[in-house]
Amino acid sequence: KNQVEQSPQSLIILEGKNCTLQCNYTVSPFSNLRWYKQDTGRGPVSLTIMTFSENTKSNGRYTATLDADTKQSSLHITASQLSDSASYICVVSETHGSGNTGKLIFGQGTTLQVKP
Amino acid sequence: NAGVTQTPKFRILKIGQSMTLQCTQDMNHNYMYWYRQDPGMGLKLIYYSVGAGITDKGEVPNGYNVSRSTTEDFPLRLELAAPSQTSVYFCASSSPRENTEAFFGQGTRLTVV
């Protein structure tokens, strides 16, 4: 069964500190891996999208890495801000053959709380 | 830009009632999805559609129905509401091109009592 697992489940850090969130997946083959930020009561918003051939991608203070051999990804947040408090979700796009089915498989998310 | 619009934002249903959650997008996306998110859990795929007239089941389709008569609209129907369907529902859309972003609506919070 294709799965996406994230760790830790929740994390509390002080403002200004860095943190790294982990994602392991068993989806194969996959089209791309995405990290989303979901604020409480809102829909997810995309942070990064990486194909299996990309190792790293940055979006401001967010840097995602991907190791397609070990099927692991991480999201590193630098110099955290109070507004970074949210749920961060790892999503893998499933694909079969030459086409992209479009099915997105979601991890359970990591809830990050940044304290002043 | 409206993006993905869901209505209603909140709804309380009694057991056995039916309702339709509306979803419309103005980005001309072929792919549309319905997810549910239970408290503290990840999003689970209910149904998805790769184009008008085509729908397919996701992980948790039981108790729901969908239709896709136009590219813009993808309504989700609950026929006999049950307490287990209390959840937040998200609609999303994306282009079929590889590695394009999926856009989500703001969600519909449904409570079945």
Image (cartoon, rainbow, N blue to C red):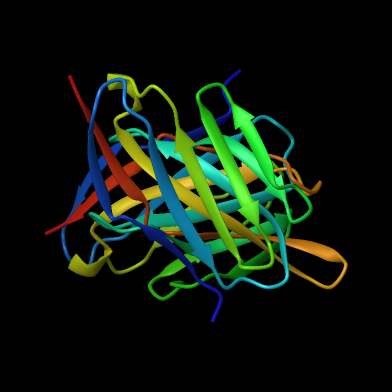
Where B14 sits versus B103, above or below? below
Quarter of the image with the C terminus of chain B in it: bottom left
Residue A68, image x and y in percent?
68, 62
Is residue B23 rendered to the left or right of residue A13? right
Q: Residue furthest right?
A: A98
Residue A93 image position (x, y, % from top left): 65, 58
Please indicate, yes or no, whether residue A44 appears anywhere in the rendered image.
no
Where is residue A18? Give x, y as percent. 37, 31
Residue at 84% over, 64% down: A99
Q: In this view, does B112 lie to the left or right of B88?
A: left
Q: In which quarter of the image is residue A39?
A: top left
Left or right, B41 with respect to A100, comes to: left
Residue at 49% over, 52% down: A90
Q: Residue most toward the front?
A: A17
Left of B37 or right of it: where is A33?
right
Badge count: 0
Identified at 23% across, 69% down, the residue is: B84
Indicate whether A22 appears above or below B95.
below
Residue drawn 54% across and 64% down?
B47
Tell me if residue A112 can be seen.
Answer: yes
Residue A80, percent from left and from top: 35, 24
Q: In which quarter of the image is the N terminus of chain B?
A: top right
